[in-house]
Amino acid sequence: TAMDRPISIEYIDMPETIREKYQYYTCAECGKLRQTGFTEPMTPLEEGVRDYVRNHLNTASPHLENRRSTE
């Protein structure tokens, strides 16, 4: 896990009053991006979350610093 801790996820039902206004599922279609000539590898979701937590949120000033992982 991103913080080397056991996974603890609690799912909460979406309130009915906002269900029609909320997007439950998002999937990026990268075909058009590849057609433009972009050949860089995509970052897997788990790796991106890990990088964001460790190198951004888990800093002394997460809202002020701009860090990029070098892993």
Image (cartoon, rainbow, N blue to C red):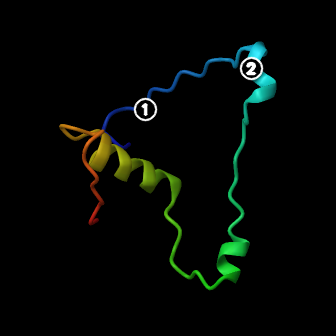
Q: Amino acid at mark 2?
A: Ile
In the displayed structure, would residue 64 be above or below residue 68?
Answer: above
Circle 1 — which element? Answer: loop
Q: Residue furthest right?
A: 20
How far apart are the alpha carbons under marks 1 and 2?
Answer: 27 Å
Q: Residue at x 70, y 82 (%)?
A: 35
- Mark before the other along the chain sequence, 1 or 2: 1
Left or right? Give the position of 45 relative to 32: left
In the displayed structure, would residue 53 be above or below residue 14?
Answer: below
Label 1: how many Cα within 10 Å (few below 14, some 14–19, many 20+): few
Residue 14 coordinates in the image, percent (x, y): 70, 19
In the displayed structure, would residue 23 be above or below residue 20?
Answer: below
Left or right? Give the position of 67 relative to 41: left
Report the label total: 2
Residue 66 coordinates in the image, percent (x, y): 28, 52
Q: Residue at x 77, y 14 (%)?
A: 17
Residue 69 coordinates in the image, percent (x, y): 29, 60
Q: Residue at x 18, y 37 (%)?
A: 60
The residue that label 2 is drawn on is 18
In the displayed structure, would residue 62 be above or below residue 36?
Answer: above
Q: Nearer the viewer, residue 63 or 69?
A: 63
Q: Amino acid at mark 1?
A: Ile
Label 2: how many Cα within 10 Å (few below 14, some 14–19, many 20+): few
The residue that label 1 is drawn on is 7
Mark whose residue sits in front, 1 or 2? 2
Q: Quadrant of the N terminus?
A: top left
Q: Could you say which disc has been placed on residue 48 in the image?
A: none
The answer to whether mark 1 and mark 2 are in CB contact below 8 A is: no
Q: Nearer the viewer, residue 64 or 46?
A: 64
